[in-house]
Image: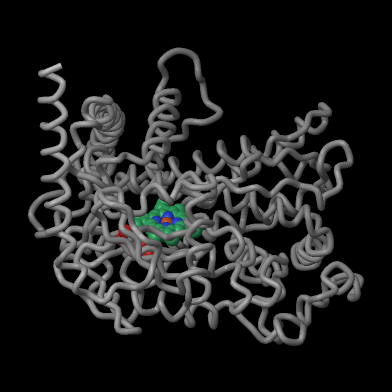
Amino acid sequence: MHKKINYVSLFDMFFFVHLLSKYVLFKKSSSLRLPPGPRPWPIVGNLLQLSQGGANLHETFAKWGKQYGPLFYLRLGSVHTVVASSPAMVKEFLKTHDQQFYYRPIQTMFCEIVFASHGIVFAEGGPMWRYLRKICITELFTVKRLQSFEPMRTKEICSMLNNIHMENEEGKVVNLNFHLTCLVNNIITSTLFGKKFYGVEESGETDALQFKQILEDVNHWFVTLIISDYIPSLRWVARLQGIEAALLKLQQRKSQFVQKLIKEHKSSMATTDQDSGNKNTTNKPKDFMSVLLSAPREDGTGNMDDETIECVVMELLAAGTETSMYTIEWGLSELIRSPVVMKRVQTELETVIGTNRLVEEADLPKLTYLQAVVKETFRLHPPAPLLLPHGSLDETCQIAGGYDIPPRTKVMVNMWAMGRDPSIWERPLEFYPERFLQQQQDSEAHKYDLQPNLLQQQHPTVDKTVDATKNVDVKENTFEHLPFGSGKRSCPGRPMGNMVVEIVLARLLQAFNWELPNKQDPKTLDMTEKFGGVIHRAQPLQVRAYLKLPAHLLK
Ligand code: HEM
């Protein structure tokens, strides 16, 4: 009994000291003019309210945005957080004060251990991050480099089309999610390491199996809420729960896997150099890992170190795969639900490309309606609904409205809420690509509308004359539509991500007619979302695909 009382008083003392330290910390911020927001609880702040009702984070934030305004404040444990959800507020952070808010000051245990926070995505900022972004833009995502991988992409897409066709011939329902996972992973890893891991030999402890397991674990931990990320004094809890050990083990597995690839690359580069006197004599495109291995260090002395390369390639893999593949799945889901829009995009493909050859990447600029379909998909289903967190480092910043943003505040942008905001978009919940077409492009698209009145029948409420005046560039310049972010932290992989989404969708639509299994009414297709780092369909898309091109074109 005596012992128990001692424990209780010890706990009380710990609790009191904890509260006192929080009080001292937040006394300072209470003199600041913070944006409005829900009332925080002691210690945990608004953390518990986040999970109330089981809604996805971006949905909860959209609800609070309506209640508290386009900029609201939360305290998540000890982490100051603000959420912006109007073009004017987003412009404040991504343009007007981009110089102060381009940092990623909030590091989670996952980023710290698994990515060591010294690549691009999770790096706070600084000269190394700037240098790596420069390499992305001048070396990796150039038109020339991306074009050099076109034959690989064409081959992979054709192989997927063939597999889908064969499954359908056997009377099977096609799980599109499965096919897209294989395809997009193979495209990205072939670009990054010159290797693919899906659809290859899978018996035993193969590279493919290891790769998939690592990727699964990285995705799992990326979205797992670890309490000590918000209440750092509870790090010992993460230790006791074995979280820290699990993350360290994942880091080692990831490191061993990528280091093996780096070793293979170094020895094949050495052989090529010996054979050809420093000239690349093979027709194989130079993958990103080879480019990074021959890139100089930031200070110009020697080559970049292996740890940085390891970090960068894994980040590119994590950033580039699910974003692209889920967009394609959402796009096709929306088109199946809107037969008139589906008809228009397929007619555009028939008219511009014909039926004697498959659409190629060089054709994409001519397919204006397809581009509008992709933009409309990003509007309703931005893969990163809250972008990635931004923030300032050590200074308090004053922004429009007279609000103070304390140092190291996590700044989130609710792109998902903006995409569905009726004050920005007319009839925001309708899938209506025409809203992105300029007037002259719009009349072009009408060429492909076989029955002009059908669109109005399907969307009786849509007033085309109003929406047709809008175009996507205006929407980006006015900070209304930014699926790739904007400013210093905007997505460097955009040229690749956008192109992969467009070409895969174009080929799927050109090659097949799509239906739901068992003659299910398209309007009843379940569109429930799940947030797991990237927004994806709660239920993978299951479809029937009927070939509409000669089968030999898929070879
Ligand atoms: C549909 C495709 C994609 C979408 C929608 C997308 C979207 C985004 C968004 C919203 C951000 C955060 C911007 C911010 O913090 O404000 C981002 C960052 C990033 N993305 Fe993408 N992305 C896509 C594809 C790719 C691809 C294919 C790659 C590379 C293979 C890539 C590499 C990156 C990197 C490295 C960053 C971090 C930039 C930094 O922190 O400086 N992304 N992306």
Say which quadrant the N terminus sits in: top left
Above or below, 425 against 291 in this view is below
Towards the viewer: 39 or 242: 39
Above or below, 426 against 298 in this view is below
Towards the viewer: 73 or 347: 73
Q: Give the residue drawn at x 65%, y 47%.
A: 528
Above or below, 407 against 423 in this view is above
Residue 360 is situated, as x and y percent measured from the top left of the image, at: 64, 58
Residue 383 is situated, as x and y percent measured from the top left of the image, at: 52, 55
Towards the viewer: 432 or 42: 42
Q: Quadrant of residue 298?
A: bottom left
According to the image, what is the colour scheme of the structure?
A: one colour
Residue 473 is situated, as x and y percent measured from the top left of the image, at: 54, 80
Q: Quadrant of residue 219?
A: top left
Say whether residue 457 is visible: yes
Q: Give the residue drawn at x 33%, y 42%.
A: 314
Tally of marks: 0
> Where ligand 1 lies, by quadrant?
bottom left
Residue with the most extreme front position: 1
Q: Give the residue drawn at x 86%, y 47%.
A: 521
Say which quadrant the C terminus sits in: top right
Towards the viewer: 486 or 480: 480
Say whether residue 146 is visible: no
Residue 500 is situated, as x and y percent measured from the top left of the image, at: 55, 54
